[in-house]
Amino acid sequence: MNTLDFLKPRSRQIDFENFDDRILSYVLEKEQSFLTCISCGGCTATCSAGNLTHFNIRRIGLSLRRGNVNELSNEIEKCMFCGKCTLVCPRDINIRNVMLLLKKRVAQLKTEKLF
């Protein structure tokens, strides 16, 4: 391994060949307000779990929009569902509900072994 490998940025392109929108479509069906998210970071700044771990709600939203299902399943478990994110959201997005929907859908996909 080259010592300068950490300087190479990871690609941010969406791979539409492998794009998985099962979770995104489920969340948008139940919580349409998520469409108005501008990724301002207010939710992440007030997150109790984010202060204690490397949990980042904005990164979860980005992973959700990009269809990175594997990243979501690991990150969802860190959420404490306190609701602070919902209180500070300038767009009135019920982020707590989005997180609950994510957790529910990921669990469904795991039990169906579609994940």
Image (cartoon, rainbow, N blue to C red):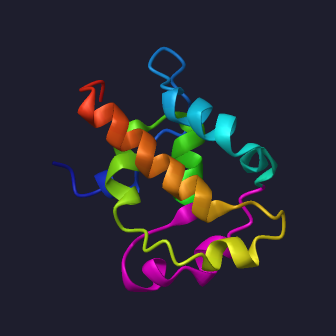
Q: Identify the residue at image location x=48%, y=38%.
A: 11
x, y (%) of residue 7?
39, 56
Q: Is residue 18 left or right of residue 45?
A: left
- Spot occupied by residue 27 in the image (x, y as percentages of width and height): 60, 40
Residue 25 placement: quadrant: top right
| Quarter that holds the C terminus | top left
Question: In the image, residue 93 lies at what x, y percent?
Answer: 75, 60
The residue lying at 15 percent from left, 48 percent from top is 1
Residue 9 visible in the displayed image? no
Q: Which residues are magenta?
A: 38-57
Is residue 30 placed above or below 100 in the rendered structure? above
Which of the pair 5/55 is nearer the observer? Answer: 55
Q: Report the residue at 64% width, 62% height from top.
A: 95
- In magenta segment, residue 51: yes
Q: Residue 15 appears at what percent x and percent y?
A: 51, 24
Pick the residue in front: 77 or 12.
77
Q: Quadrant of residue 97?
A: bottom right
75 above or below 21? Answer: below
